Image (tube, rainbow, N blue to C red):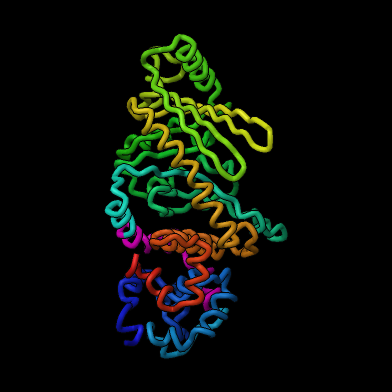
Protein backbone atom coordinates (compact mmCIF):
# COMPACT_ATOMS: atom_id res chain seq x y z
CA UNK A 1 0.00 0.00 0.00
CA UNK A 2 1.35 3.44 -0.88
CA UNK A 3 2.64 5.59 1.96
CA UNK A 4 0.38 8.55 1.21
CA UNK A 5 -2.73 6.37 1.61
CA UNK A 6 -1.65 5.31 5.06
CA UNK A 7 -0.56 8.62 6.54
CA UNK A 8 -1.33 12.08 5.20
CA UNK A 9 -0.20 15.58 6.11
CA UNK A 10 -3.70 17.07 5.98
CA UNK A 11 -3.87 17.70 9.74
CA UNK A 12 -0.40 19.27 9.68
CA UNK A 13 -1.03 21.54 6.71
CA UNK A 14 -4.21 22.97 8.23
CA UNK A 15 -2.25 24.63 11.07
CA UNK A 16 -0.46 26.98 8.65
CA UNK A 17 -3.22 27.89 6.21
CA UNK A 18 -4.02 31.21 7.92
CA UNK A 19 -0.37 32.30 8.15
CA UNK A 20 0.27 35.48 6.16
CA UNK A 21 2.77 35.19 3.32
CA UNK A 22 4.80 38.40 3.16
CA UNK A 23 6.60 37.42 -0.04
CA UNK A 24 5.93 39.23 -3.29
CA UNK A 25 3.41 37.45 -5.51
CA UNK A 26 5.69 38.03 -8.50
CA UNK A 27 7.44 34.78 -9.44
CA UNK A 28 6.13 33.06 -6.31
CA UNK A 29 6.26 29.38 -7.26
CA UNK A 30 6.04 27.57 -3.92
CA UNK A 31 3.25 27.81 -1.36
CA UNK A 32 4.16 29.04 2.12
CA UNK A 33 2.58 25.97 3.71
CA UNK A 34 4.65 23.57 1.64
CA UNK A 35 7.88 25.38 2.46
CA UNK A 36 7.13 25.23 6.20
CA UNK A 37 6.03 21.58 6.21
CA UNK A 38 9.13 20.52 4.26
CA UNK A 39 11.28 22.49 6.71
CA UNK A 40 9.68 20.69 9.68
CA UNK A 41 10.21 17.31 8.05
CA UNK A 42 13.83 18.14 7.28
CA UNK A 43 14.56 19.37 10.82
CA UNK A 44 13.07 16.17 12.23
CA UNK A 45 15.36 14.24 9.85
CA UNK A 46 18.48 16.11 11.01
CA UNK A 47 18.68 19.37 9.03
CA UNK A 48 20.34 22.28 10.87
CA UNK A 49 19.71 25.23 8.55
CA UNK A 50 18.25 26.35 5.19
CA UNK A 51 21.07 24.76 3.17
CA UNK A 52 20.58 21.40 4.87
CA UNK A 53 16.79 21.66 4.50
CA UNK A 54 17.10 22.26 0.76
CA UNK A 55 19.62 19.45 0.34
CA UNK A 56 17.42 16.98 2.23
CA UNK A 57 14.35 18.04 0.22
CA UNK A 58 16.19 17.59 -3.08
CA UNK A 59 17.29 14.09 -2.08
CA UNK A 60 13.76 13.24 -0.90
CA UNK A 61 11.89 14.64 -3.92
CA UNK A 62 10.33 11.29 -4.82
CA UNK A 63 8.91 10.98 -1.30
CA UNK A 64 7.81 14.62 -0.98
CA UNK A 65 5.80 14.71 -4.22
CA UNK A 66 3.71 11.85 -2.82
CA UNK A 67 2.71 13.70 0.36
CA UNK A 68 2.60 17.33 -0.85
CA UNK A 69 1.33 19.15 -3.94
CA UNK A 70 4.67 20.19 -5.42
CA UNK A 71 3.63 21.21 -8.91
CA UNK A 72 6.63 23.49 -9.25
CA UNK A 73 9.11 21.04 -7.82
CA UNK A 74 11.31 21.33 -4.74
CA UNK A 75 12.00 24.83 -3.32
CA UNK A 76 15.58 26.05 -3.41
CA UNK A 77 17.78 27.01 -0.46
CA UNK A 78 17.02 30.68 -1.10
CA UNK A 79 13.27 30.02 -0.82
CA UNK A 80 13.62 28.28 2.54
CA UNK A 81 15.94 30.99 3.77
CA UNK A 82 13.70 33.84 2.61
CA UNK A 83 10.56 32.34 4.13
CA UNK A 84 12.14 31.62 7.52
CA UNK A 85 13.74 35.08 7.57
CA UNK A 86 10.53 36.98 6.80
CA UNK A 87 8.13 35.05 9.04
CA UNK A 88 7.34 36.95 12.23
CA UNK A 89 8.34 34.59 15.08
CA UNK A 90 5.23 35.38 17.14
CA UNK A 91 2.92 34.69 14.18
CA UNK A 92 4.83 31.52 13.33
CA UNK A 93 4.50 30.18 16.87
CA UNK A 94 0.83 31.11 16.98
CA UNK A 95 0.20 28.59 14.20
CA UNK A 96 1.30 25.81 16.52
CA UNK A 97 -1.14 26.60 19.33
CA UNK A 98 -3.87 24.15 18.36
CA UNK A 99 -1.31 21.51 17.45
CA UNK A 100 0.44 21.92 20.79
CA UNK A 101 -2.87 21.84 22.69
CA UNK A 102 -3.68 18.52 21.02
CA UNK A 103 -0.28 17.12 22.01
CA UNK A 104 -0.78 18.38 25.54
CA UNK A 105 -4.20 16.75 25.74
CA UNK A 106 -2.73 13.45 24.55
CA UNK A 107 0.05 13.75 27.14
CA UNK A 108 -2.46 14.32 29.93
CA UNK A 109 -4.33 11.19 28.88
CA UNK A 110 -1.08 9.22 28.60
CA UNK A 111 0.49 10.31 31.90
CA UNK A 112 -2.60 11.01 34.00
CA UNK A 113 -0.93 14.25 35.17
CA UNK A 114 -3.46 17.08 35.13
CA UNK A 115 -1.39 19.57 37.15
CA UNK A 116 1.87 19.70 35.18
CA UNK A 117 5.12 21.34 36.19
CA UNK A 118 5.84 24.12 33.68
CA UNK A 119 9.49 25.12 33.98
CA UNK A 120 10.40 28.57 32.69
CA UNK A 121 14.07 29.09 31.88
CA UNK A 122 16.37 30.68 29.32
CA UNK A 123 19.03 29.24 27.04
CA UNK A 124 21.74 30.99 25.01
CA UNK A 125 22.89 29.66 21.63
CA UNK A 126 26.49 30.77 22.08
CA UNK A 127 27.64 30.92 18.47
CA UNK A 128 24.61 32.70 17.03
CA UNK A 129 26.07 36.19 17.50
CA UNK A 130 27.24 38.52 14.73
CA UNK A 131 29.56 41.18 16.14
CA UNK A 132 29.87 42.94 12.77
CA UNK A 133 26.12 43.60 12.77
CA UNK A 134 25.88 44.24 16.50
CA UNK A 135 23.78 41.13 17.01
CA UNK A 136 24.28 39.34 20.31
CA UNK A 137 23.84 35.60 20.76
CA UNK A 138 20.24 34.40 20.76
CA UNK A 139 18.84 33.98 24.26
CA UNK A 140 15.41 32.35 24.31
CA UNK A 141 13.12 31.80 27.29
CA UNK A 142 11.19 28.54 27.07
CA UNK A 143 8.22 27.02 28.87
CA UNK A 144 8.94 23.30 29.21
CA UNK A 145 6.44 20.75 30.47
CA UNK A 146 8.95 18.24 31.83
CA UNK A 147 6.48 15.42 32.53
CA UNK A 148 4.98 15.71 29.04
CA UNK A 149 8.20 16.34 27.12
CA UNK A 150 6.66 19.40 25.47
CA UNK A 151 8.04 22.85 24.73
CA UNK A 152 4.95 25.04 24.99
CA UNK A 153 6.40 28.39 23.95
CA UNK A 154 9.47 30.49 23.31
CA UNK A 155 10.31 34.19 23.56
CA UNK A 156 13.66 35.55 22.42
CA UNK A 157 15.40 38.31 24.33
CA UNK A 158 18.70 40.13 23.97
CA UNK A 159 20.47 38.45 26.87
CA UNK A 160 19.86 36.65 30.16
CA UNK A 161 19.28 39.89 32.05
CA UNK A 162 16.22 40.53 29.88
CA UNK A 163 14.44 37.39 31.10
CA UNK A 164 12.54 39.57 33.60
CA UNK A 165 10.64 41.19 30.73
CA UNK A 166 10.45 38.04 28.58
CA UNK A 167 8.86 35.83 31.26
CA UNK A 168 5.57 37.79 31.55
CA UNK A 169 5.35 37.77 27.77
CA UNK A 170 5.70 34.00 27.51
CA UNK A 171 3.28 33.39 30.38
CA UNK A 172 0.63 35.20 28.31
CA UNK A 173 1.32 32.88 25.36
CA UNK A 174 0.82 29.63 27.25
CA UNK A 175 -2.26 28.23 28.97
CA UNK A 176 -0.96 28.00 32.54
CA UNK A 177 -4.30 27.33 34.27
CA UNK A 178 -3.99 24.62 36.89
CA UNK A 179 -0.24 24.23 36.39
CA UNK A 180 2.70 24.76 38.75
CA UNK A 181 5.12 27.33 37.34
CA UNK A 182 8.77 27.04 38.35
CA UNK A 183 11.33 29.79 37.70
CA UNK A 184 14.96 30.41 38.66
CA UNK A 185 15.93 33.25 40.97
CA UNK A 186 16.26 35.87 38.23
CA UNK A 187 12.55 35.53 37.49
CA UNK A 188 11.54 35.73 41.15
CA UNK A 189 9.70 39.01 40.83
CA UNK A 190 6.53 40.20 42.60
CA UNK A 191 4.83 41.13 39.33
CA UNK A 192 5.56 37.69 37.85
CA UNK A 193 4.20 35.92 40.94
CA UNK A 194 1.04 38.02 40.69
CA UNK A 195 0.61 37.21 37.01
CA UNK A 196 0.92 33.49 37.73
CA UNK A 197 -1.72 33.61 40.45
CA UNK A 198 -4.03 35.75 38.30
CA UNK A 199 -3.56 33.21 35.50
CA UNK A 200 -4.94 30.43 37.69
CA UNK A 201 -1.63 28.68 38.39
CA UNK A 202 0.67 28.12 41.36
CA UNK A 203 4.35 28.98 41.59
CA UNK A 204 7.59 27.68 43.05
CA UNK A 205 10.23 30.41 42.75
CA UNK A 206 13.91 30.11 43.62
CA UNK A 207 15.54 32.65 45.93
CA UNK A 208 19.02 34.14 45.76
CA UNK A 209 20.67 37.44 46.58
CA UNK A 210 18.45 39.40 44.19
CA UNK A 211 15.73 39.12 46.85
CA UNK A 212 18.06 39.90 49.73
CA UNK A 213 15.67 40.66 52.59
CA UNK A 214 13.23 37.88 51.75
CA UNK A 215 16.04 35.43 51.03
CA UNK A 216 17.67 35.99 54.40
CA UNK A 217 14.31 35.87 56.19
CA UNK A 218 13.48 32.50 54.57
CA UNK A 219 16.89 31.08 55.51
CA UNK A 220 16.43 32.21 59.11
CA UNK A 221 12.89 30.83 59.33
CA UNK A 222 13.85 27.43 57.97
CA UNK A 223 16.96 27.23 60.16
CA UNK A 224 14.82 28.00 63.20
CA UNK A 225 12.26 25.37 62.21
CA UNK A 226 14.97 22.74 61.75
CA UNK A 227 16.72 23.56 65.02
CA UNK A 228 13.43 23.62 66.91
CA UNK A 229 12.19 20.44 65.24
CA UNK A 230 9.03 22.29 64.24
CA UNK A 231 5.91 20.16 63.92
CA UNK A 232 4.76 22.38 61.04
CA UNK A 233 7.72 21.50 58.82
CA UNK A 234 7.43 18.58 56.38
CA UNK A 235 10.50 16.66 55.26
CA UNK A 236 11.32 14.26 52.43
CA UNK A 237 14.67 12.55 51.74
CA UNK A 238 15.57 10.95 48.41
CA UNK A 239 18.72 9.16 47.24
CA UNK A 240 20.08 8.54 43.76
CA UNK A 241 23.12 6.69 42.46
CA UNK A 242 24.56 6.48 38.97
CA UNK A 243 27.25 7.81 36.66
CA UNK A 244 29.83 7.61 39.43
CA UNK A 245 27.93 9.75 41.92
CA UNK A 246 25.76 9.34 44.97
CA UNK A 247 23.33 12.15 45.72
CA UNK A 248 21.00 12.64 48.65
CA UNK A 249 18.42 15.40 48.58
CA UNK A 250 16.52 16.63 51.61
CA UNK A 251 13.35 18.62 50.90
CA UNK A 252 11.88 20.74 53.69
CA UNK A 253 8.65 22.70 53.36
CA UNK A 254 7.22 25.11 55.92
CA UNK A 255 4.11 27.33 56.05
CA UNK A 256 4.99 31.00 55.72
CA UNK A 257 5.69 32.17 59.29
CA UNK A 258 3.63 35.09 60.52
CA UNK A 259 5.52 38.34 60.14
CA UNK A 260 8.10 36.93 57.69
CA UNK A 261 9.97 39.99 56.42
CA UNK A 262 8.96 40.97 52.89
CA UNK A 263 6.34 38.23 52.51
CA UNK A 264 3.17 40.34 52.38
CA UNK A 265 3.94 41.83 48.93
CA UNK A 266 4.04 38.40 47.25
CA UNK A 267 0.59 37.47 46.01
CA UNK A 268 -0.45 33.94 46.94
CA UNK A 269 2.65 33.21 49.01
CA UNK A 270 1.75 30.26 51.23
CA UNK A 271 4.89 28.20 51.90
CA UNK A 272 8.66 28.34 51.87
CA UNK A 273 11.11 25.54 51.17
CA UNK A 274 14.65 24.27 51.20
CA UNK A 275 16.38 21.64 49.08
CA UNK A 276 19.67 20.44 50.58
CA UNK A 277 21.70 18.43 48.10
CA UNK A 278 24.70 16.31 49.15
CA UNK A 279 26.63 14.81 46.23
CA UNK A 280 29.58 12.39 46.46
CA UNK A 281 31.65 11.99 43.30
CA UNK A 282 35.27 10.92 42.78
CA UNK A 283 35.89 10.95 46.51
CA UNK A 284 34.68 14.53 46.87
CA UNK A 285 31.59 15.80 48.62
CA UNK A 286 29.60 18.84 47.51
CA UNK A 287 26.74 20.27 49.55
CA UNK A 288 24.36 22.85 48.13
CA UNK A 289 21.32 24.56 49.63
CA UNK A 290 18.54 26.12 47.54
CA UNK A 291 15.67 28.13 48.98
CA UNK A 292 12.22 28.73 47.51
CA UNK A 293 8.97 30.60 47.98
CA UNK A 294 5.71 29.05 46.81
CA UNK A 295 1.96 29.45 46.55
CA UNK A 296 1.55 25.70 47.11
CA UNK A 297 -0.08 24.45 50.25
CA UNK A 298 1.72 22.05 52.56
CA UNK A 299 2.63 18.89 50.65
CA UNK A 300 6.36 18.23 50.62
CA UNK A 301 6.08 15.56 47.92
CA UNK A 302 4.38 18.03 45.61
CA UNK A 303 7.04 20.64 46.43
CA UNK A 304 9.78 18.11 45.64
CA UNK A 305 8.08 17.18 42.37
CA UNK A 306 8.01 20.83 41.35
CA UNK A 307 11.71 21.33 42.08
CA UNK A 308 12.68 18.15 40.21
CA UNK A 309 10.42 19.18 37.34
CA UNK A 310 12.30 22.44 36.97
CA UNK A 311 15.64 20.66 36.82
CA UNK A 312 14.15 18.63 33.98
CA UNK A 313 14.36 21.58 31.58
CA UNK A 314 18.15 21.32 31.64
CA UNK A 315 18.27 17.57 30.99
CA UNK A 316 15.15 17.09 28.92
CA UNK A 317 15.23 20.25 26.81
CA UNK A 318 18.47 22.28 26.86
CA UNK A 319 20.82 19.29 26.84
CA UNK A 320 18.90 17.67 23.97
CA UNK A 321 18.92 20.90 21.98
CA UNK A 322 22.71 21.11 22.30
CA UNK A 323 23.62 17.45 21.91
CA UNK A 324 20.99 16.31 19.40
CA UNK A 325 20.15 19.53 17.52
CA UNK A 326 23.52 21.29 17.82
CA UNK A 327 21.88 24.49 19.09
CA UNK A 328 24.93 25.76 20.95
CA UNK A 329 27.05 25.38 17.81
CA UNK A 330 24.49 26.96 15.48
CA UNK A 331 25.84 29.83 13.38
CA UNK A 332 22.48 31.04 12.08
CA UNK A 333 22.82 34.78 12.61
CA UNK A 334 19.79 36.48 11.04
CA UNK A 335 17.39 37.59 13.77
CA UNK A 336 14.07 36.09 12.61
CA UNK A 337 15.70 33.10 10.93
CA UNK A 338 17.47 31.99 14.09
CA UNK A 339 14.36 32.54 16.25
CA UNK A 340 12.14 30.58 13.89
CA UNK A 341 14.71 27.81 13.61
CA UNK A 342 15.10 27.69 17.40
CA UNK A 343 11.34 27.21 17.71
CA UNK A 344 11.29 24.47 15.06
CA UNK A 345 14.04 22.70 17.00
CA UNK A 346 12.07 22.91 20.25
CA UNK A 347 8.86 21.82 18.59
CA UNK A 348 10.38 18.88 16.73
CA UNK A 349 12.15 17.86 19.96
CA UNK A 350 8.68 17.75 21.53
CA UNK A 351 7.40 15.57 18.71
CA UNK A 352 10.32 13.18 19.13
CA UNK A 353 9.67 12.92 22.86
CA UNK A 354 6.03 11.96 22.23
CA UNK A 355 7.16 8.87 20.35
CA UNK A 356 6.95 5.87 22.62
CA UNK A 357 9.79 3.40 22.90
CA UNK A 358 13.16 2.95 24.55
CA UNK A 359 15.24 4.67 21.85
CA UNK A 360 16.95 7.93 22.76
CA UNK A 361 15.87 11.22 21.22
CA UNK A 362 19.03 11.19 19.12
CA UNK A 363 18.23 7.71 17.78
CA UNK A 364 14.65 8.73 17.02
CA UNK A 365 15.90 11.72 15.06
CA UNK A 366 18.32 9.54 13.11
CA UNK A 367 15.46 7.15 12.41
CA UNK A 368 13.48 10.04 10.93
CA UNK A 369 16.34 10.53 8.50
CA UNK A 370 16.50 6.82 7.66
CA UNK A 371 12.80 5.94 7.39
CA UNK A 372 10.15 8.00 5.63
CA UNK A 373 7.43 5.99 7.32
CA UNK A 374 8.90 6.66 10.76
CA UNK A 375 9.32 10.35 9.88
CA UNK A 376 5.66 10.67 8.91
CA UNK A 377 4.53 8.86 12.03
CA UNK A 378 6.50 11.23 14.27
CA UNK A 379 5.28 14.39 12.51
CA UNK A 380 1.64 13.35 12.46
CA UNK A 381 1.60 11.47 15.75
CA UNK A 382 -0.11 8.60 13.98
CA UNK A 383 1.76 6.01 16.08
CA UNK A 384 2.73 7.26 19.54
x then y, percent, for residue 256: 39, 19
- The answer to whether 3 is drawn above or below residue 165 in the figure is below
* Residue 225 visible in the displayed image: yes
* Residue 265 visible in the displayed image: no
x then y, percent, for residue 250: 48, 27
Quadrant of the drawing holding the N terminus = bottom left
Residue at point 64% right, 37% down? 281
Residue at point 60% right, 61% down? 326
- The answer to whether 93 is drawn above or below residue 301 in the figure is below
Q: Nearer the viewer, residue 128 or 149?
A: 149
From the image, give the main secondary structure of the stretch colored magenta: helix
> Quick check: 177 left or right of 212?
left
Quadrant of the drawing holding the C terminus = bottom left
* In the image, residue 80 lies in the stretch drawn in magenta: yes
Q: Quadrant of residue 118?
A: top left
Circle count: 0
Residue at point 33% right, 59% down? 103
x then y, percent, for residue 231: 37, 13
* In the image, residue 364 lies in the stretch drawn in magenta: no
Q: Residue furthest right?
A: 132
Q: Nearer the viewer, residue 304 or 67?
A: 304
- The answer to whether 247 is drawn above or below residue 17 in the figure is above
x then y, percent, for residue 312: 48, 45
In this picture, which residue range is highlighted in magenta?
Answer: 79-102
Q: Nearer the viewer, residue 255 or 300?
A: 300
Amino acid sequence: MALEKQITLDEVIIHFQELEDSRSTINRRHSLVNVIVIALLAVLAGASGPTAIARWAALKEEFLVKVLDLTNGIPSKDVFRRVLMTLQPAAFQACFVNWMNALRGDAVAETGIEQPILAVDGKTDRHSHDRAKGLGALHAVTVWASEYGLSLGQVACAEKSNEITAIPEILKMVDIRGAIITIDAMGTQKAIAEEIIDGGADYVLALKGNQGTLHQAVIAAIDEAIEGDSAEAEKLVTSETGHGREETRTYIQLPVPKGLAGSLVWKGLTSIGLVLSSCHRDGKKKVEARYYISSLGMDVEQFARAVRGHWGIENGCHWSLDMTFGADASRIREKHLRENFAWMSRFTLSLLKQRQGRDSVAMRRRSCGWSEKFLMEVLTGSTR
